[in-house]
Amino acid sequence: MKTSRRSFLKTATAGAVAAAAPSMAFGAPRREPLRFAQIGCGGKGESDRDAMLAAGAKLVALCDVDENNAKKVFMKHADLPKYKDYREMLDKHEKEIDAVVVSTPDHVHAAAALDAIRRGKHVYVQKPLARTWAECQALLESSRKHGVVTQMGNQGHAGSGLKLWEEMAKAEAFGDILEIHTWSDRPIWAQGMTAAPKEMPVPATLDWNNWLGPSADRPYSKAYVPFSWRGWWDFGCGAMGDMACHNMDPAFWIFKLGLPVSIKAQASAPAGIAYPNWSIIEYKFGPTPSLPKGVKLTWLDGHKLPAAPPGADPALKLGDNGCMVIGSKMTAMGGSHAGSPRVIAVGDKTDADAIKEADKHWQEVHKTVKGTDHYAQWVHAAEAKDQAATKSNFEYAAPFTQGILLGCIALRFPGQELLWDNEKKQFSNFPEANQWLSFKPRAGYDLTVG
């Protein structure tokens, strides 16, 4: 049968379109947008919601215990149902939603996300993933059991900065890894408290009981809400909870660090009901495929900074937040949120020309690597039910956060080296520390794998 050139091109073009866009080919319907409910709408919840909508997701219902803090978002969605208890919202809208976004204070992350996962809902959970080691483990095991798509809210993990860190590691540009340092200017809220604040009248716009969630009952104080909860042990994870999931991310990711073998902290005072004003936490990690000798990683906060590395310009400014990988061949440093690294030393002797040349090369490489939208990555993966498509999924985010939280426990025992037994999932040399790996929630909240 003879085929004209015109009909051949028409047929070939149709086939190409079908291959490139199967959802549009031959009249196939477009995939429905991801339907989600939001838990925690004020503060970070507002930007989380905006990003999900920009990625094409559809908002179905809203939950926030603080009407005043969520006022702006509630007004934008006057037609949508609103709740103060996320459990009520999930019960009423279970059949109408595909996913849940959790943007609450740290102490509610796990309880809310586990409730959603048990219902088969995909979850996006702000960082840190949870407040305790056991909660992270429950989230990881539950996500596996129910096959849901997950993502933790460390946005820089999808950025071009982290990709440049990856390229440096792949090229073995650092040589032997000598040390890693990460730091933050946090806390920017009160810490170091040794007594509970005085009781105050609960604002009419706040549901204090639901704000407490799984945590033990106590009187209300504005010292907790809406922002300063981070400094209190029962509600937050201190400076590390705010910034370590961002600033440690390059090191954990490119070197596949996993959980440490030991942790030892220095601090302004032992953590008690609140976190200390400053801390320096030394982690030791065992061998990995790219680090046959293991490595020491040091976290610093409260305006503590590491020393400039050998070979760096004496006038080097480290900045308020950062990650620095010191290698025998090259040292690089990036800013907060897995920021793009710059070369700051070549070898151990200061050579301004060598530093300039090396940095120029890596900034050219940076132009070739592209970041992706962290939120859209989760939205599209959830629509496709593709668990592997998110890069800060719980397979990575759970052990990463657990490592950070072990450091928080070390703050309760400054000067004491804690040895971690990953097979037994506990500290092997200091039993007193194991009580802080988990906590018993209030009645009505379930932190187990379901």
Image (cartoon, helix red, strand yellow):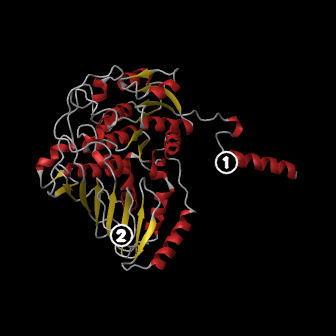
Compared to 339, does 346 lie above or below?
Answer: below
Q: Which residue is mark 1?
A: 19
Compared to 175, does 243 lie above or below?
Answer: above
The residue shown at (24%, 25%) is 200
Position of residue 23 in the picture relative to residue 292 (left or right) = right
Q: Which mark is residue 326?
A: 2
Q: Residues within 10 Å of mark 1 (few under 14, many from 20)?
A: few
Q: Position of residue 278 (x, y in %)?
A: 25, 52
Compared to 161, does 177 lie above or below?
Answer: below
Q: Quick one: 244 or 406, which is closer to the camera?
A: 244
Position of residue 61 in the picture relative to residue 439 (left or right) = right
Q: Position of residue 373 (x, y in %)?
A: 53, 47
Tell me where residue 280 sits by quadrant.
Answer: bottom left
Residue 424 in view of the camera:
no
The residue shown at (44%, 41%) is 149
Sooner in the amino-acid sequence: mark 1 or mark 2: 1
